[in-house]
Amino acid sequence: MDEIKLPTNLPENISQKIRSDGKIRRIVVDRIKCIGANSCVAVAPGVFQLDDQNLAYVTDPDSTDEDTIRLSAESCPVLAVLLFDADGKQLFPEE
């Protein structure tokens, strides 16, 4: 398995997991931005869940395809879901 580089711009309070392959390799939830809208869970329930504080966290990053993961990130009204490639480059939202 290739080394997955750590992004330099990660928020302080996050939930994150690494995918085993594909272009999207790191899924991050910025838990400070998260408002518990539940849209990421509605789109990709295997990847995201809400905790007892009503904040999203990453459960199983390999449970669905990359298109669904991207749609779940795009569905977040506050852009709290961040997607990165293996080199640590942010894929979504685009910088």
Image (cartoon, grey):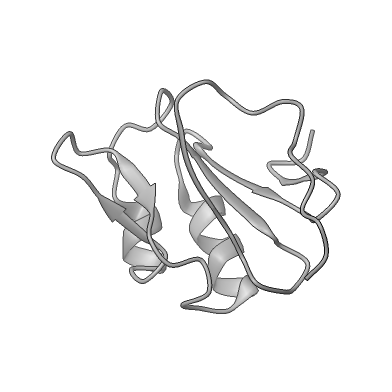
Q: Residue at x 45, y 39 (%)?
A: 77
Q: Residue at x 29, y 43 (%)?
A: 37
Depth check, front residue: 69 or 51: 51
Q: In the rendered view of the protein, which quadrant contains the C terminus?
A: top right
Report x, y in % for residue 92.
69, 46
Asked whether, in this view, residue 77 is left or right of residue 71, the answer is left
Q: Position of residue 22 (x, y in %)?
A: 74, 73
83 versus 65 height, above or below: above
User: Residue 80: x percent and y percent?
Assistant: 49, 36
Q: In this view, does 28 lie to the left or right of 32?
A: right
- Residue at the location (77% across, 40% down)? 94
As drawn, the residue found furthest toward the left would be: 52
Question: Taking 2 as reference, is 83 left or right?
Answer: left
Give the total number of marks visible in the rendering.
0
Locate residue 12, reporting x and y percent: 52, 20
Q: Tell which of 31 and 37 is nearer to you.
A: 31
In this rendering, position of residue 51 left or right of residue 27: left
User: Which quarter of the rendered picture does the N terminus lie within?
Assistant: bottom right
Observer-nearest residue: 48 or 4?
A: 4
